[in-house]
Image: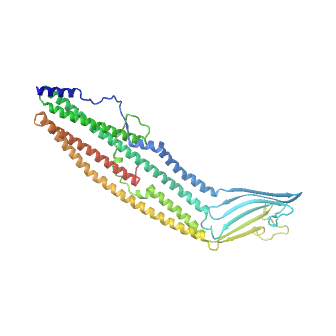
Amino acid sequence: MMRVWKCLLFSVVILFAPKAPMVAQSAPLQLSLDQAVNWALENHPLGIMANAVEERGPAALMRSRGNLDPKLFSTYDRKQFQGTEYFDYGEAGVEWQSPAALKFSAGYQFADGTYLNDELVVPSAGQAYLAVKLPLLQGLLVDETRTDLRQGDLEVDRNRADANIIRNELRYDLALRFADWAYTERILEINRETLRLIEQRFRDTQGLFEQGDKPAVDTLEVYVSLGTQRLTVQQAEVDARLARQAFNELYWPMDENTRPLTLDDRWTSIPEAGGWLMQHPDLLEKQIALAQTQLEQRLKREKLKPKLDVGYYLLGDGFDISPVPVGGENGGFFTRAYKLDAKFSYPIFNRKARGDVQLGQLKITESTAKIDAKQQALITKADAYRDAVRQYDSQLAAGQDLGRQAEALLQAERRLFSLGESTQFLLNSREQSLQKARLTVAKLAFSQIKAVLTYRYVTAQWE
């Protein structure tokens, strides 16, 4: 009588056992990491920001070249008081700073008035002039204009490096999230496959129980295993959903049916191309910043020199440059009518310039130390992740071998179970071993992919 009640109890458990939900799904859309990266670089705010940062370089270069643009100028000054015209003075012209130290200008002056200063007196027709100015000491070899031009050239490369730093971060973050999403989907797939096998075994065991070939306890044991696996699948679904949402933060155009494609060899293997250290954007940015600091230091050293600027003006009568006197020749073309000036200045102690030089040298020392530290850190990290990838190769091979052995043991155990020479407990144990082996291989593959992606991030090698 007790056996009958047990059979009825197990039958009720089997009848009301929760079934896995069936959801109608459309064909999934496959998404590759290359597609996601290309979209993010063009459309994600970080990608747009990287493009804007790179475009700052040409703008800075244009600004620095603007120092060589010819400049128009004009002045006008007039004073009249109680019917007396004290002075009426004006000047207009154009000046141009050459890429060298020379500065050229051409202009026209007119002046009239009762109380006109002697240095402003010009012929009645006004006076045109041609002028050239040259610094003989400070500014002869280095000046602000030439320094700005070189800074502008460097700014193009520096902003490109800054943009590549942003792109490197974006690629790495996106690739890691994609790999995590693909890993959680793989874990979910393994658990669902295991669930399907347990469900099939549950139905087989249920049929054998109903035929009287298996005891009720075998049915209960399979049912417990089935419930445990369903909980595992539910947790895997939660993990996959969270990983998907994390990826969706960086890649927006995706729907519920989108699934990650398996990463190809380009994303799962170490790149063989050398010379990455010379092209690394972090190092390039620091090296260019150091070059800019060295340019500034040259300019600061130039300011240790005294200022001695000379100017030569070729004068005219009206617009007749270097006119011939009425009485005949009086000197050559450049000596008949000219003006020459010279300006000298030098701070007695020049502490400002000397202090700037000392500060600049300290800044160079700091920048050089940062470059050396960054370079050593990159080399060390790259070597570490390269070694890790190689170690994962051997671990993956061992894990896959264990998986094949676990699958062979499960097949053998199933044959024994069908012949009545094994127990449900041993069969469950073999299935759990196979599932554990598959999960271990998936985790090792994910760890290797993370190591490869981190190596690519450290070396900034994505192409």
Instruction: Looking at this view, name the residue that lies furthest to the front.
Output: 2
**Quarter where residue 299 is shown:** bottom right
Count numbered badges in the picture.
0
Instruction: Looking at this view, name the residue that lies furthest to the right.
Output: 83
Foreground residue among 238 and 171: 238
The residue shown at (28%, 30%) is: 20
Foreground residue among 449 and 12: 12
Residue 73's x, y, as percent?
72, 56
Q: Is residue 310 visible?
A: yes
Q: Is 67 positioned to the left or the right of 215 in the image?
A: right
- Relative height, residue 316 to residue 435 (above, below): below
The residue shown at (39%, 59%) is: 377
- Relative height, residue 345 to residue 94 (above, below): below
Colouring scheme, one of rainbow, by chain, secondary structure, one colour: rainbow
* Quadrant holding the N terminus: top left
Foreground residue among 417 and 332: 417
Residue 221's x, y, as percent?
18, 34
Q: Is 108 positioned to the left or the right of 344 in the image?
A: right
Foreground residue among 110 and 447: 447
**Quarter where residue 332 is shown:** bottom right
Residue 365's x, y, as percent?
48, 66
- Relative height, residue 297 to residue 76 (above, below): below
Q: Is 257 positioned to the left or the right of 131 in the image?
A: left
Q: Is residue 197 visible?
A: no
**Quarter where residue 264 is shown:** top left
The residue shown at (51%, 65%) is: 363
Residue 64's x, y, as percent?
60, 56
